[in-house]
């Protein structure tokens, strides 16, 4: 998994993994650390935006937390 750059220094995200129709986001802390988001849930628009932010290394955590459909709409968590 690529390490999340965390350019603003305030993100709890440690790494991510992308595929054609998903992104897995791993947080540094928490009971559930890896959250999977797919084109099916929460949807392609959100997943593609999250992929762009992950590659940039900036804004992914804020995007997740500011969009209820994303924050509570993950496909799975582990």
Image (spheres, rainbow, N blue to C red):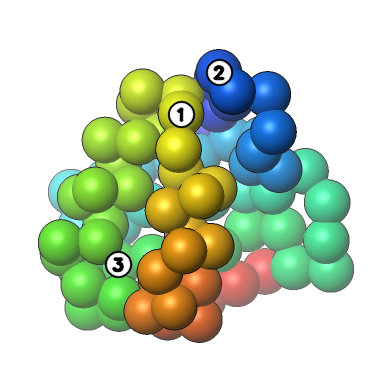
Residue of label 1: 58
Against 37, residue 53 (above or below) is: above
Q: Quadrant of residue 67?
A: bottom left
The image shows residue 70 at horizontal and vertical percentages of: 41, 71
Of 16 and 49, nearer the camera is 49
The image shows residue 32 at horizontal and vertical percentages of: 74, 68
| Whether label 2 touches label 3, CB < 8 Å | no
Q: Which mark is residue 38?
A: 3
Answer left or right for 39 relative to 4.
Answer: left
The image shows residue 69 at horizontal and vertical percentages of: 37, 79
Residue of label 2: 7
Q: Residue 15 carries which label?
A: none
Camera-nearest label, 3 or 1: 1
The structure residue drawn at horizontal position 55% and vertical position 18%, both measured from the top left corner, is: 7
Camera-nearest label, 2 or 3: 2
Q: Residues within 10 Å of mark 1 (few under 14, many from 20)?
A: some
Q: Marks 3 and 1, Cα distance to the nearest angstrom? A: 20 Å
Q: Is residue 23 visible?
A: yes
- The quadrant in which the C terminus is found is bottom right
Helix or strand or loop: what does disc 2 sit on?
A: loop
Q: Marks 2 and 3, Cα distance to the nearest angstrom? A: 25 Å
Q: Marks 2 and 1, Cα distance to the nearest angstrom? A: 6 Å
Answer left or right for 19 relative to 72.
Answer: left
| Whether label 2 touches label 1, CB < 8 Å | yes
The structure residue drawn at horizontal position 83% and vertical position 51%, both measured from the top left corner, is: 29
Q: How crowded is mark 2: few (under 14 residues within 10 Å), some or many (20 or more)?
A: few
Helix or strand or loop: what does disc 1 sit on?
A: loop
**Badge 2 or badge 3: first in the primary sequence:** 2
The image shows residue 51 at horizontal and vertical percentages of: 30, 41
The structure residue drawn at horizontal position 60% and vertical position 72%, both measured from the top left corner, is: 77
Against 51, residue 44 (above or below) is: below
Helix or strand or loop: what does disc 3 sit on?
A: strand
């Amino acid at each position: 998994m690529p390490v999340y750059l965390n350019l603003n220094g305030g993100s709890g995200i440690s790494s991510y993994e992308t595929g054609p129709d998903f992104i897995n986001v791993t947080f540094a802390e928490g009971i559930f650390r890896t959250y999977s988001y797919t084109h099916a849930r929460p949807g392609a628009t959100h997943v593609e935006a999250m992929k762009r932010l992950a590659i940039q290394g900036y804004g992914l955590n804020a995007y997740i937390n500011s969009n209820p459909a994303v924050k509570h709409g993950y496909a799975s968590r582990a």
